Structures are given as C-alpha cells and as structure tokens.
Image (cartoon, rainbow, N blue to C red):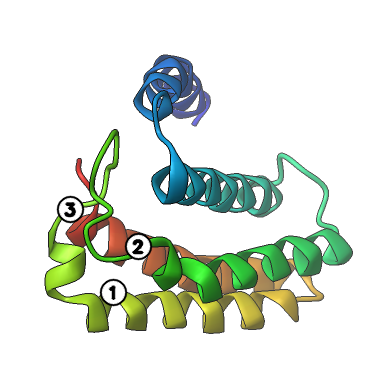
Amino acid sequence: MIRYIKLLGVAAIVAIPALAQAHSGATGIVKKRMETMKDVGAVMKELGAMVKGDARFDPSAVARRAGDLKVHAANMPTLFPEGSIHGPSEALPQIWKDFERFSRIASDLESAAAALSSVTEATALPAALGAAGKTCKACHSDYRKP
C-alpha cells in the first residue's frame, strides 16, 4: 500500500507541471472550464483523503465541498458552448455530437453531489463519493482527451 501511495505521489509530481503547461494559453470559456475542472478535482481529492483516512472526516467540510461540486455540475453544460474546442482544450468533439448525454452526466453529478452533501457519517462517505466519481469517469472516458 505504501508503495502504491508513493507511486501516486510521483505521478502527481510529474503530472502537475504538464497540467499547468496544458492550461497555459487558455482564455475565455476554455480557461473558465479548466479552472472549474481543476476545482472539481480538488474537491474529489479533499474528500478522497477523508475516505482514505489521510484527513479527518469533517461533515461540514463534506457539505461545503459537495455544495461546490453541485454548483459546478449545474453549470457544466454552459461551460461547453458549441465550438469551444479551440486552444489547449482537452474536450473532444464528441461532447457536441452527444450533448444531451453529456448534459445528463452533468445532471447525474449534480444529483450525486446533493446526496454527498447530506453525508454526516464517515461510513457513508465512500459510497457517496464513489457515485460522484462514476460520473466524472463516464465523462472523462467519452469526452476528454486521454
């Protein structure tokens, strides 16, 4: 397990500069959605640390960050207006070919975030966070460059 955690740490150290470079030059709506996705990732990381026991379970922090996630999910479709694939965007054209499904996944994330915001026991956090994570994975699998 410690080896796995070290490997994740090394991967993060390598990925962070690449991510920063990938986002350089982004402007307008592309920059706004990249910043939003960065915060979504931060929410998942913060709550994931509680699941793993790396951070103390804090129901008020869970509710607050789940609320942030819910707002981001509600706004997600507006961050992808047709044709906004320019610049350093990681979005695939498939988003606009199947925008109804993309919007449905964002709605599913919003619902999962609402459920997550009501978690008051540490034992309920893994399943609630997992449900939110499934929506992220579904979107990334089909609509984001690898």
Question: Counting residues from the N terminus, which is met first, the one under dot 3 or under dot 2?
Answer: 2
Residue 27 higher or lower than 50, as above or below: above
Residue 2 higher or lower than 68, as above or below: above
Badge 1 marks a residue whose secondary structure is helix
Residue 77 pos. (x, y %)? 40, 72
- Asked whether the beta carbons under mark 3 and mark 2 sit within 8 Å of each other, the answer is no
Task: Identify the amino acid type marked 2.
Answer: Phe
Q: Quadrant of the C terminus?
A: top left
Measure how far apart labels 3 and 2 are at the Cα level.
Answer: 11 Å
Label 3: how many Cα within 10 Å (few below 14, some 14–19, many 20+): some
Question: Counting residues from the N terminus, which is met first, the one under dot 3 or under dot 1?
Answer: 3
Question: Which disc number belongs to residue 92?
Answer: 3
Of discs 1 and 2, which sits in the foreground? Answer: 2
Q: Residue at x 81, y 56 (%)?
A: 57
Question: 66 or 120: which is nearer to us?
Answer: 66
Left or right: residue 64 versus residue 137 is right
Label 1: how many Cα within 10 Å (few below 14, some 14–19, many 20+): many
Measure how far apart labels 3 and 1 are at the Cα level.
Answer: 11 Å
Q: Residue at x 64, y 81 (%)?
A: 114
Question: Counting residues from the N terminus, which is met first, the one under dot 1 or under dot 2?
Answer: 2
Of discs 3 and 2, which sits in the foreground? Answer: 2
Task: Identify the amino acid type marked 1.
Answer: Phe
Residue 120 higher or lower than 144, as above or below: below
- Asked whether the beta carbons under mark 1 and mark 2 sit within 8 Å of each other, the answer is yes
Question: Which disc number belongs to residue 80?
Answer: 2
Question: Which disc number belongs to residue 102?
Answer: 1
Badge 3 marks a residue whose secondary structure is loop
Residue 35 higher or lower than 24, as above or below: below
